[in-house]
Image (cartoon, grey):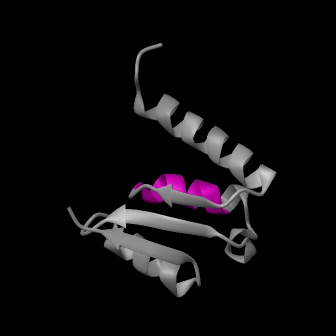
Amino acid sequence: MPWCPLALQQNYLRLADRILDAGHPVSFATHDAGLINELLRRHPGLVDVPLVEFEMLLGLGTSTLDRLRADNFTTREYSI
């Protein structure tokens, strides 16, 4: 199957759903605001789930990370 952004997003969400449904700790590493918004839509109580955090590289999606932090999510920002 050739790589395409839609297939990547669908697989990311499918795996995220499985991890969350199983109750495992997870760090979502993406700067894709649409993907994050879809995760939040699919899992409306996600902020109340322990050991869930969002990670991004420094400077990518800063406003999204700020919004998540303001909504009480654990966030991390990395520089390389």
Image location of residue 39, percent across then percent down = 62, 56
**Total number of numbered labels?**
0
Residue 73 relative to residue 41: left or right = left
Is residue 39 inside the magenta stretch?
yes
The image shows residue 41 at horizontal and vertical percentages of: 67, 60
| 77 to the left or right of 35 | left
Residue visible at 65% across and 70% down in the picture: 51
Q: Which residues are magenta?
A: 32-40
Q: Is residue 54 left or right of residue 59?
A: right
Residue 8: x and y, percent? 48, 34
Where 69 sits versus 7, above or below?
below
Establish if 66 lies above or below 3.
below
The one nearer the camera, 77 or 11, is 77
Q: Residue at x 33, y 73 (%)?
A: 62
Q: Furthest residue to the right?
A: 22
Measured along the vertical axis of the image, is residue 17 above or below residue 49?
above
Reply above or below: 36 against 50.
above
Name the quadrant of the C terminus: bottom left
- Which residue: 74% across, 76% down? 48
Left or right of 64, for residue 78: left
Q: Quadrant of residue 15?
A: top right
Magenta stretch, main secondary structure, is helix
Residue 72 is situated, as x and y percent measured from the top left of the image, at 59, 84
Residue at image position (47%, 79%) is 67
Say which quarter of the image contains residue 31.
Answer: bottom left
Residue 71 is one of the magenta-drawn residues: no
Residue furthest left as drawn: 80
